[in-house]
Amino acid sequence: MERSTRRVKKPIGSYPRVRIEGGGRAVVSQAGSVLPVETVRKAGLDTGISAALTPWRKARAVHDPGRILLDVALAVVLGGDCLADVAMLRAESAVFGPVASDPTVFRLIDTLAASGEKALQAVRSARSEVRDRRSATGEDGRR
């Protein structure tokens, strides 16, 4: 029995680039998220977290576990208080691109939680590597 699934041309990874321009078009309700998204990208935290969570990526996964975790963090930054609040990102696909469904987010968090300290250490190591790399180049953000 074949399982019918929609084919996706490429896996979903980083956030799309956002341009700010005035032109009378509708305003994005989560425009305040541009700064944290660009900070994550500029620091390399998006690629660092994605690389660290590669062991938890399913073989045919569409959504990158690192991106999912960053989406959850961004939802918290924007005022969310539960995993389902990634829906506010999903509602602004022009800004955030494709965002994982609630069941996908919950499955990843369950998987990471089941891994215990191993997953937590992977995230900590990625953060530390990014911080060390930025510090070594004089871009640690301190003034």
Image (cartoon, rainbow, N blue to C red):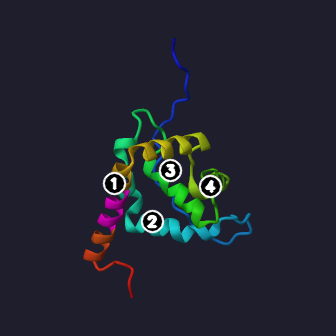
Give the residue number, with chain letter if any, for mark 4: 82
Q: Quadrant of residue 46?
A: bottom left
Q: Between marks 1 and 3, how big is the CA–CA gap?
A: 15 Å
Q: Between marks 1 and 4, how big is the CA–CA gap?
A: 22 Å
Chain part drawn in magenta = 123-130
In the image, residue 71 lies at what x, y percent? 53, 55
Q: Is residue 27 magenta?
A: no
Q: Earlier in the sequence, mark 2 or mark 3?
A: 2
Q: Between marks 2 and 3, how big is the CA–CA gap?
A: 13 Å
Give the residue number, with chain letter if any, for mark 2: 40
Q: Dot 4 surroundings within 10 Å: few (below 14), some, or many (20 or more)?
A: few
Give the residue number, with chain letter if any, for mark 3: 68
Asked whether residue 123 is in view, the answer is yes
Q: Earlier in the sequence, mark 1 or mark 3?
A: 3
Residue at 38% from the left image edge and 54% from the top image edge: 120
Q: Earlier in the sequence, mark 1 or mark 2?
A: 2
Give the residue number, with chain letter if any, for mark 1: 122
Q: Are marks 3 and 4 in contact (CB under 8 Å)?
A: no
Q: Between marks 4 and 2, how big is the CA–CA gap?
A: 21 Å
Q: Dot 1 surroundings within 10 Å: few (below 14), some, or many (20 or more)?
A: some
User: Predominant secondary structure in magenta?
Assistant: helix
Residue at 33% from the left image edge and 78% from the top image edge: 139
Residue at 57% from the left image edge and 56% from the top image edge: 96
Q: Are marks 1 and 3 in contact (CB under 8 Å)?
A: no
Vertical placement of residue 88 versus 3, above or below: below
